[in-house]
Amino acid sequence: MVVPNAQRDAIDSIVQYLDRINLKESARMLERESGLFFNVAYFEDCFLRGAFEAAEDYLTGFTGVHDNNFTINVVFELRWHKFLAALNDNNREEARVIIREKLQPLAVYNKDLLGFANTLVNMHNFRTHEAFLFYGEPQYHRMERLELIRMNLNSNPLLHGKLRYAIHSVYNSLVIAPPIPAALAVPAASLVPIGPAPRAAPQPLAVLHTAMADSAAYRRLISSVIKLLDSNNYHESARTLEKESGFVFNLGYFEHCFVMGLLEEAEDYLAGFLPYIHENAYCVNVFFELNWQKFMDVLDQGDRIEARRILDEDLRPFERYQPDLIVSASELASLEDFRTHEAFMNYGVPEEERRERLEFVRTNLEANPLLDGKIQYDPPAPPQA
């Protein structure tokens, strides 16, 4: 799809502005979701520090894994070095999972790949293999592969005109919002610019972001950008910006995730506003509800192993508020069918059960002082013609 130049310029301005005020997660999401700008510096940083999933997720916003040889080469580097990182950590089980889930789909391009990988994973020390006698620190060897990766990125026709090699300095006086063209349906006049930075020594943008967060003009600007993104169907970017800025809590989105069983997504979004689950009773109630519903979902699917994992990792922090919680949950997880328990004989479809809990969840969100003035409700439905 060809994007008009005015819209491309507008997205470019927003990405640069988000970088300048240190809302970098939102900037990267908008690059990925729009597919207009590929931040090579970010991608290479992910690769070097071993954030392979983040790097591949970013890349696949621009190109499919099997679209061409250039993409295949880069994806292979990501997955192979993830495999080597698991071997370096002596995590053979994880290495076998990577072979099965990540390397096997690429074996069609190299018939020796799986055999070689399985040989390495079965060795007591993979560095005793003749091909790895001089393999040292993983990050050093990733640096050696950067030139190959960059060459494939440069040659990929799907990335033509999209590659960017520099991230704007976080130490600068450019805290004035760049002009955002009106092409994305929000009048430029409604995007209130931030005043110029003081002439004092520059501060890290994290500090500037905190200081500007108290500015009504700044909050209006971020809210306008969120609306702009939504109006142009960049919904993932809008939700990321809401969460990262902490200004607007989209109740409709959160409730949709909750009802539809997207509970990890709902919890991740909520944590952007309420990072500490024990902050107050309202936080405890909502986070408990999310994790309890996760537990009930996997019980409904008959996955008792996953249910026990959720019990141990996600529900146990709430035991302090309800001493019998773990015992009761363990009893449910031990049953072949949890609906035979007298308390759950009338338990129906999980989605409907979650709908019945919406009022409780909403009440606790609305009463939470940490969300005061941040909750955005769905707009009223337009009148019927």
Image (cartoon, helix red, strand yellow):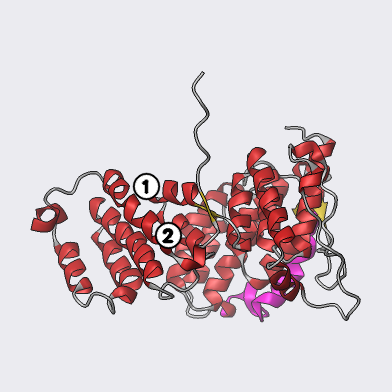
Q: Residue furthest top?
A: 385
Q: Can the viewer see residue 379 in this picture? A: yes
Which is more foreground, mark 2 or mark 1?
A: 2
Residue shown at 48% from the left, 75% from the top: 123
- Picture coordinates of residue 285, whole percent (x, y): 34, 66
Q: Secondary structure at mark 1?
A: helix
Q: Earlier in the sequence, mark 2 or mark 1?
A: 1
Q: Which mark is residue 365?
A: 2
Q: Residues within 10 Å of mark 1 (few under 14, many from 20)?
A: many
- Picture coordinates of residue 23, whole percent (x, y): 69, 63
**Left or right: 56, with 260 as reference point:** right
Q: Nearer the viewer, residue 158 or 358?
A: 358
Q: Nearer the viewer, residue 315 or 384?
A: 384
Q: Quadrant of residue 240?
A: bottom right
For the residues labelled 2 and 1, the Cα–Cα distance comes to: 15 Å
| Mark 1: amino acid | Val
- 381 over 57 or under it: above or below: above
Q: Which mark is residue 259?
A: 1
Q: Nearer the viewer, residue 380 or 314?
A: 380
Q: Residues within 10 Å of mark 2 (few under 14, many from 20)?
A: many
Residue shown at 58% from the left, 70% from the top: 84
Q: Can the viewer see residue 43 in this picture? A: no
Q: Which mark is residue 362?
A: none
| Mark 2: amino acid | Leu
Residues in magenta, as a range: 128-151
- Picture coordinates of residue 4, whole percent (x, y): 81, 34
Q: Quadrant of residue 46?
A: bottom right
**Left or right: 216, with 314 as reference point:** right
Task: State the quadrant of the N terminus.
Answer: top right
Q: Residue furthest right?
A: 199
Residue shown at 81% from the left, 44% from the top: 188
Residue 136 lies in magenta, yes or no? Answer: yes
